Amino acid sequence: MNYRVAKILAAEDLGGAGTKVIDINIADLISRIDIIFRTLNGASTFDDHPAANITKIELVDGSDVLFSLNGREAQALNFYDRGEASDNHMTGSNGEWMRAVFGIDFGRRLFDPELAFDPTKFTNPQLKITWDENLACTTAGDNFLTVQAHLFDELTPSPTGFLMAKNVYTYTPVANAYEYLDLPTDHPIRTLLVGSHQEEFNFTQMIADVKLSEDNDKRIPLDLTGDELFYLMKQLYPEYIENVYMVIANTGTDFRVTPFEDAIIVGQLTSNPQDLSGLFGNGGLAAFATETTPVTVYFLCKGYIPHGLVAIPFGSPADLADWYDVTKVGTLQMRVKAGPTLGTGPLAQVVTQQLRSYA
C-alpha cells in the first residue's frame, strides 16, 4: 500500500479550554495533517463560527515554528489551496454537534511527492492546539478533538522541502490609516493572505488597498485596491459553498457563515410551511426569522473571501519555479491601508505560505 492514514490523537474530550501538546512520533513522510474539533451545543445559539473554537494551531520543533495559524486562517488557506470548502458541520441547534476541520498541507496537493513533511529531519516535532469550546456556542458542554495524518507508506519519495504557513502579523487597523509591515525574505513565498474579520463589515470596508514594495520602491510587485483584490479572487478561485442547519425562531435567529462577500443564502423549511425572511449582514453574520413558529431550516450559502481573508498567489501554485523568490530581495515591505469603516476593536491579519527547503 502506497499510502495510509494514521491517527495521531483518537477522539478526546479536552475540557473547556487550554492547549493540547502532541508529540509527532512518526518516522514516515507526512503529506497532510487533519484536525477535527467537535462541540455539543447546549442551546439553540450560534455565537460564532465553529472555526473560532480553535484559537491557534502550531507545529514546532523546539523554538523553530513550522506552522502557526488560528482556525479561521487555517480554513481560509485550505480553501485557497484546495478550491473546496472545509468539512464543517455548521449548526447552532440545541443538542447538535458543531464540527470544524482544519488541515496542515505540506504539499501542493495530497501526496505530493516533491513536498512533504519529514519528521526525521527534526529533533522533537510537536503539534500544539489551543482551543476554547465555548466560543462558537457559549453553552457547549462537550468536545472531541481528533488528529490524523496522511502518510506515505510503501511509496517513499524524496521530497525537497515542505510548505510552511505562519501568521506574520496581527494588528489593530485605524480607519483610513496606513500600516507598514516588513515581510520575511528567508524562504520563497507561494501565497500571501491578507484581510480582517469583523461581523457586519465586508472585506472592502476593512481593507482599502494593499501594496508590496521591494527595496524602498525599487520594484512594486503589487498595488491593488480592496475592490480590485476582490475581483481577483472571483477570477482565480471558485465560490465557497456550504450548508447550515439551524432552528430559526419567529422572533429572529442569528447564525454564522464562512463567506464574507457576495454571499447568497437560501433556506428550505423542514416542516410547518410559512414565510422565511432574512438578511446577510456581511462579515459572516446572517439573521433570519420565520413567520409564526420556530422551524428547523436547511440553508445553502455561497460567496467569496472565506473568513475575510484574500489570497495573493505568485505565479502558478503548482509550479515551484514560479513562486516569489524573496531571498533575492533586500527588503520586502507591505503597506496596507485600512478602509473607512472598521467598527469596534477590529483586527487585521497577514499570513505567509512559504517553501521551506531541506537543503
Image: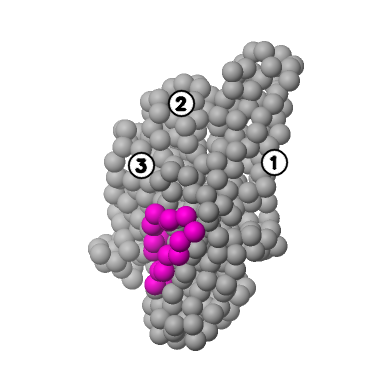
Residue type (three-letter) at the residue carrying disc 1: Ile
Nearest the eye: 356 or 174:
174
Specify few, some or many for label 1: CA neighbours under 10 Å numbering under 14, 14-19, or 20 or more.
Answer: some
Q: Position of residue 150 (x, y in %)?
A: 48, 56
Nearest the eye: 41 or 235:
235
| Residue 232, placed above or below residue 16 | below
Check residue 92 in the rendering and tell me which mark sits there, or answer none: none
Q: Position of residue 316 (x, y in %)?
A: 62, 73
User: Mark 2 or 1 closer to N-term?
Assistant: 2
Q: Identify which residue is drawn at 47% across, 69% down.
A: 335
Specify few, some or many for label 3: CA neighbours under 10 Å numbering under 14, 14-19, or 20 or more.
Answer: many
Check residue 131 in the rendering and tell me which mark sits there, or answer none: 3
Nearest the eye: 217 or 161:
217
Taking 205 as reference, is 23 left or right? left
User: Mark 3 or 2 closer to N-term?
Assistant: 2
| Residue 138, placed above or below residue 132 | above
Foreground: disc 2 or disc 1: 1
For label 1, the residue is: 264
Residue type (three-letter) at the residue carrying disc 2: Asn
Q: Position of residue 223 (x, y in %)?
A: 57, 72
Q: Secondary structure at mark 2?
A: loop
Residue type (three-letter) at the residue carrying disc 3: Trp
User: Mark 1 or 3 closer to N-term?
Assistant: 3
Q: Is residue 177 magenta?
A: yes
Q: Identify which residue is drawn at 44% across, 77% down.
A: 332
For label 2, the residue is: 41
Give the magenta part as a residue range.
162-183
Specify few, some or many for label 2: CA neighbours under 10 Å numbering under 14, 14-19, or 20 or more.
Answer: many
